[in-house]
Structure formats: structure tokens, C-alpha cells
Image (cartoon, helix red, strand yellow):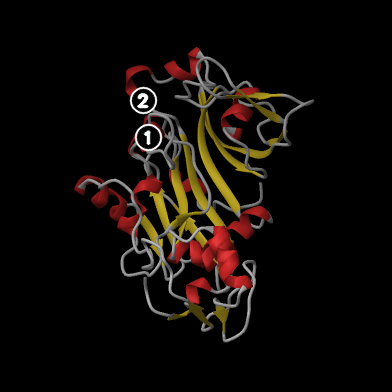
Amino acid sequence: MSDVQAHAVADSEDGIRLDRWFKRHFPALNHGRLEKLLRTGQIRLDGGRAKSNTRLEAGQTIRVPPLDTEAPAPVTKSASPRVSDADIDALHEAILYMDDDVIALNKAPGLAVQGGTGTHRHLDGMLDVLRFDAPDRPRLVHRLDRDTSGVILIARTVRAASDLAAAFKAKTARKVYWALVAGSPRPRDGVIDLALEKQAGPRGERVVADEDEGQTAITIYRTVDYAGGKVTWLVMEPLTGRTHQLRVHAAALGTPIVGDTKYGSRDALSVGGDGLAKGLQLHARAIRLPRPGGGVLEVTAPLPPHMAMAWRFFGFEQGAESDPFRAS
């Protein structure tokens, strides 16, 4: 049993709920016990009573009474598996931008963002190696498909995670993707407004177009260049964030993304023959959104090796699209 403790609310914890603060710092204290300590006034905030949903302010003092828990010490590390030296080096090399609030990574294709059935190696399980000297463990604020490469943002503080999540929810974040698709879309530029529905099947989850039961999904697309009618370089900007949205929308245009084994066609898998490396030709090229604390954050990611090879193979000049956020 510990003595009475006084904890100052850190700047990075400004705005979080009191119950969430306890969950982070005293994980062995269950919610029922917390509520009882609050009701009886044993837990106090700046000397006064508080409720579990009270929002904290940086600099406030939390009185914590003696707790008969097995783990009263603040949490400093996650229980993630050991990360290999190769993965540590790769993640550090993938950093595109970092400040006190945000890390922007150029995620490699093939790296899952989160774990699942049969998935033990994933970005979420490696985030401790991106902690550096920060008091908080970094946390994800959005997702990319396993096979999609490109910009992904990691929040370094609780407040930054809240601000970034709010930007995605309010649709003030712009995400621009580059895709190599089989064939040529008609029209060359346009908007795809096609509702999507998730369906379970014997080969796993699949997303299909369903105007009756599906969720609204909208994508702006624009042709940058093409090669002999066989492939087209598209810029795609999703205005909604549905699972596999760009892949299904590209296929619905009749121009599936090259290398897409789930939603592609025989043509999409055979483009370039042996001249192209295998892999999905979809890349989160750039992101722009309000920066936590003020200003605008804009990050651009270079193409992964297999896509850079494809651009060279078809003679596409990456510099032809110098402004990723030009009007679509």
C-alpha cells in the first residue's frame, strides 16, 4: 500500500478526462473503485472534489490516496513485443518530419498498421521505438492499408492525438494519393460517388459497392499522365475514409490499381510483365492539416522502390506533379 501522492497534470495531458488519466497512470485501479474514491472525496483535484469525466488542465494537482493495487506506479512502457534492430533502423529512416507533437512516417508497403489474426508484426507494436525522450508513448491517429505505402501521422502527446483526430473527423485534413491504374479512366478527371459496404466471406473481409446499404464514399481523381492506353498515373483524393475506398473506386471506373490482388483484374496484375516489381501501386503521397498548436502541417513522401521502378519503366516524370494539393 502506498502513501498519499500528489501528481501534477502534464502539459501533454491537458484536456483529457480524469478517469482516463487514472487508467494511464494506475491501470490496476478498476473503474468501480475509482468512482468510490471520487464519491468519498479521497481523490481530489486542486483540493476540491471531482468527477470521473472532469477534464484536466495542465498544472493541476491530483491527490491520490493510498491504493491497495499491485501496480500503482505510472505506466511508462507498453507491453509490445521486442522490435528487431532492422525494424528500428527502418522506422528511424522512415521519419519524414518530427516536432514535439507529431511524427510523420513514410510507411513501407507490406507493413500492417495494427495487429489482427495472424498479424504479429505491425506499426502499432513498434511505436515505443519512436518515443525518444517524450513522456507519452506515441499513438496512431489514422490508418493505411497494409499494402499501401506513404505518409502516416503519429501523435506524440495526448493533446496532439485529440487535435489530429478532430481534424480528420472535421474533414479539414487533405490526403492525396498517387496510383498507377490499368487502362484509362473515362472521363480523365472526375468525382466518384459510390457507397461502399463491408462484406464477410470465406477469403476474409471484402468491400463492395452498395448504394442501398453502403456508407457514402466520395473520391476526386485526376489524370496526370498515361502510357499507350495501358496504364494511367492518377492523383486520387478521398473525401471520405472508407476501408479500401480508393481500390474499390478505381476498380469501379474500370481501371483497377496495378498490383491489386483483391480488387484488381488479370490486366491489372500482368501490366509490365516481368519489368515491374510485384506490389500494390498505391501511395499516400501527401497530407495537409491544421498543426496541433497552430499553423499548418504539410508532408510529402517519396515513392517506395517498387513504384519508383514503375514510374521509370513507363517514363513518368515525378516532377510533373510538383504541387500535390493543386485544385483537382
User: In the image, is residue 280 above or below residue 200?
Assistant: below
The secondary structure type at the circle numbered 1 is loop
Residue 278's tag is 2
Q: Is residue 315 visible?
A: yes
Where residue 250 appears, x then y in whole percent? 60, 28
Where residue 112 appears, x then y in whole percent? 41, 38
Three-letter code, disc 1: Gly
Of residues 118 and 70, the one nearer the viewer is 70
How far apart are the alpha carbons under marks 2 and 1? 11 Å
User: In the image, is residue 125 above or below residue 188?
Assistant: below
**Which residue position holds label 1?**
110
Of residues 63 and 165, the one nearer the viewer is 63
Number of marks in the rendered image: 2
Describe residue 215's horizontal placement relative to residue 146 as left or right. right
Describe residue 153's horizontal placement relative to residue 77 as left or right. right
> Residue 217 sits in which quadrant?
top right
The secondary structure type at the circle numbered 2 is loop
Describe residue 195's horizontal placement relative to residue 256 as left or right. right
Of pointers 2 and 1, the one earlier in the residue sequence: 1
Q: Residue at x 48, y 47 (%)?
A: 285
> How many neighbours does mark 2 have within 10 angstroms: few (below 14), some (14-19), or many (20 or more)?
some
Mark 2 and mark 1 residues within 8 Å of each other at the beta carbon: no
User: In the image, is residue 188 above or below residue 37?
Assistant: above
Of residues 75 and 149, the one nearer the viewer is 75
Considering the image in quadrants, where does the N terminus appear?
A: bottom left
Where residue 39 appears, x then y in whole percent? 63, 71
